[in-house]
Image (spheres, grey):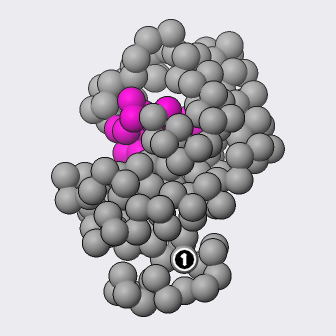
């Protein structure tokens, strides 16, 4: 689907999904982030978080390639106005007591070494808080995308 076709989608959910697919393909699913504009990067990171957490919790987000961008997560969520989700994500990141590496292999090794019932409990609390959707991520992403439409190419 072309970007022109995506902008013609009137259904908010449909537009977000199509644009998410477009941006993910544009950056080779995170392997070529330099191909994205700053707003596209923010959108990609927030969409990755939502997809991963909904599929397997924060643990899945951190273990998968999406975790490569965990250092940018709080600023991306803040950028779109998802302040409650940013705080939940901050708690999830803080559970490890140290900054997570951006390299996936290093991060997974570290996560395996740090694994504990205490961390699992914190991440589960964060998952449940995320699932409450106190921030309407779809609406916030939609507003952000429309505000920055010229930066999506």
Query: 71 left or right of 11?
Result: left
Q: Is residue 64 visible?
A: no
Q: Nearer the viewer, residue 28 or 137?
A: 137
Queried whether the magenta region covers residue 150, the answer comes back as no
Query: 131 left or right of 147?
Result: right
Q: Nearer the viewer, residue 82 or 32?
A: 82
Queried whether the magenta region covers residue 63, the answer comes back as yes
Residue range highlighted in magenta: 58-74
Q: Residue at x 65, y 61 (%)?
A: 139
Q: Nearer the viewer, residue 133 or 123?
A: 133
Q: Residue at x 57, y 61 (%)?
A: 143
Instruction: Name the spot of residue 56 as percent of width and height, x first.
Output: 62, 46
> In this picture, is 134 found above or below 90?
below
User: Which residue is denoted by mark 1 in the rendering?
Assistant: 15
Looking at the rendered structure, the secondary structure element under dot 1 is: helix
Task: Locate the C terminus by quadrant.
Answer: bottom left
Q: Residue 71: name its quadrant.
A: top left
How would you classify the magenta stretch by its main secondary structure? helix
Instruction: Name the spot of residue 62 as percent of width and height, x first.
Output: 48, 35
Q: Residue at x 57, y 25 (%)?
A: 90
Identify the residue at the far right of this view.
132
Identify the residue at the far top of this view.
97
Q: Residue 21: name its quadrant.
A: bottom left
- For label 1, count other residues whose C-alpha is less than 10 Å away and answer few (under 14), some (14-19) or many (20+): some
Instruction: Name the spot of residue 130 as percent of width and height, x first.
Output: 71, 40
């Amino acid at each position: 689907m072309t970007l022109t076709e995506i902008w013609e989608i009137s259904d908010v959910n449909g537009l977000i999904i199509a644009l998410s697919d477009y941006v993910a393909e544009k950056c080779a699913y995170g392997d070529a982030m330099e191909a994205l504009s700053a707003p596209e990067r923010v959108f990609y990171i927030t969409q990755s978080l939502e997809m991963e957490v909904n599929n397997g919790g924060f643990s899945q987000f951190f273990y998968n390639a999406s975790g490569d961008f965990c250092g940018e997560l709080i600023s991306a969520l803040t950028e779109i106005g998802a302040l409650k989700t940013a705080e939940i994500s901050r708690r999830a990141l803080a559970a490890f007591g140290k900054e997570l590496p951006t390299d996936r292999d290093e991060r997974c090794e570290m996560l395996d070494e740090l694994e504990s019932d205490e961390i699992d409990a914190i991440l589960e609390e964060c998952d449940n808080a995320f699932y409450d959707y106190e921030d309407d991520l779809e609406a916030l992403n939609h507003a952000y995308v429309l505000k920055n439409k010229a930066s999506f190419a």
